[in-house]
Amino acid sequence: MEYRLKTPLAEGDVRRLRVGDVVYLTGIIYTARDAAHRRIMEYLKEGRQLPFDLRGGAIYHCGPVVQKKNGEWIVLAGGPTTSTRMELYEGEVIEKLGVRMVIGKGGMGRKTAEACVKHGAVYTTFTGGAGVLAAQSIKRVIDVHWLDLGVPEAVWVLEVVDFGPLVVAIDSTGRNLIEEVVEESSRRKSELLKRPLILP
Amino acid sequence: MLSKETIVKAIVEGIKVASIYLPPDVKDSLKKALEVEENPATRAQLEAIFKNLDLAEKLKAPICQDTGLLSFYIKAGAKFPALDVVEEALIEATRIATREIPLRPNTVDPITGRNPGDNTGRYAPVITWDEIDPRGDYLEVTIVPKGGGSEYVAVFTMIPPGKGLEGVKEVVLDAVVKAGAMPCPPTIIGVGIAGTVDKAVSLAKKCAVIRKIGSRHPEPKIAALEEQLRDMINELGVGTMGMGGKVTALDVHVDYAYRHPATYAVAVVFQCWAARRATVTIKSNGEYTITQ
Ligand code: SF4
């Protein structure tokens, strides 16, 4: 199924999504990779208010290539980075901050999947390497937070129109598409190891 | 007279071509993947890849935001008149290309964490004097901007020599499953077999990044090994971006060196679908051509 969704995302819309569905997202997304996640966790631990509101929002694992022209930031390329590294934090971020969609590539693990089920969220993937295509749907840089972390690691607040294709890889029923594919390939590997090479 | 400036200019052009245009063999094989895949989520990935390639060409923008750590493989004619300035020229071309294209500044000092911002540094860009042609008067530089995602999942191991090629197969299949969706599949997989660590890794790397898709090793036995490993990897079903599918490896290339009786070194290197490369050939009179 193909969906066009807008932020802020409603719980019902997100819970309807299933692995393999394709989403095009319009609205506001927040980039966050390793360092931003670490800082979000610090804020949560200290009970401090974040400078941005992620309720119903989307987090994007991305370190964009940006350029400042006439005082305005523009994103030149903005494909996803590997999400695996954010597995440490994402479950708690979904739970405490009300994030409804996490966007990245490469797949995420059990803790994120559990949070998606419990709190009504999804993990979607954008095609790795398709940085120019991603930049096309980023219409404007609305704001940037924590630039002291460096350009790739800062939180970029981006206005997107029809950002996608985002493939649902973890849904709120707990299915985890990439994990299932890799588990299946691991089973097939065991079979292949029993089949000898036939060489001249 | 051939000046350093001429070499710099040719290499900057080469880096542009390599960063913006995917070589025809890679494009063709991605097209074949799109022809055989049926799963809509997998097809959506491949279609996005093609849209991205068209946009990159139209906007003259780098294909992927990870513009890589630049590697140069040099084949030098011994009679090329400006061998003494080649390394300086490559470093200067890297700085200029970083500014002009622009490329993402990727080189980081592992000790201090400092990023000089121009893709240079100690042993960076990576320069390999690969081959000398004793009678040649030309310089051939193959430019490889390779991203971190696919380099990250490389594997090196020593297997018990008694296991032989079945052991190699096991290492390769394990590596592909473990890499999963991380190296942005479909990938080109390079396998090196040797007696020493460095030889195995450098053979695997060259197999992954230099050899063209569809090219086969000249020895029939190794050629058959390449095809069977490729088919087995594709049976694993990881598919484009781990969405599941028939094409996980665009190709597998194997090379080997004689080993020591006690050592059987195996290296596996991945190259993501954004398999960027371009070769600049500079003649002694300064004329140059760029091929992919
Ligand atoms: S693995 Fe390749 S395609 Fe994927 S993000 Fe890295 S450089 Fe780009």
Image (cartoon, coloured by chain):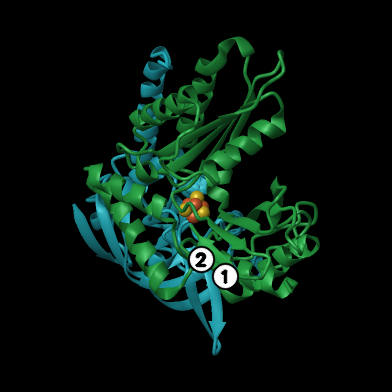
Chain colours: A cyan, B green
Could you tell me how many numbered marks the image carries?
2
Rendered image quadrant of residue A192:
top left
Q: Nearer the viewer, residue A150 or A172?
A: A150
Q: Is mark 1 within 8 Å of ligand 1?
A: no
* Quadrant that contains the C terminus of chain A: top left
Q: Secondary structure at mark 2?
A: helix
**Amino acid tagged 1:** Glu
Residue to which mark 1 is pinned? B13
Task: Give the residue drawn at x 27%, y 48%.
Answer: B34
The answer to whether B113 appears left or right of B167 in the picture is right
Q: Is mark 2 within 8 Å of ligand 1?
A: no
Q: Nearer the viewer, residue A112 or A34?
A: A34
Q: Is residue A32 visible?
A: yes
Residue A107 is situated, as x and y percent measured from the top left of the image, at: 43, 44
Residue B17 bears which disc, if any?
2
Residue B40 against residue B165 in the figure, above or below:
below
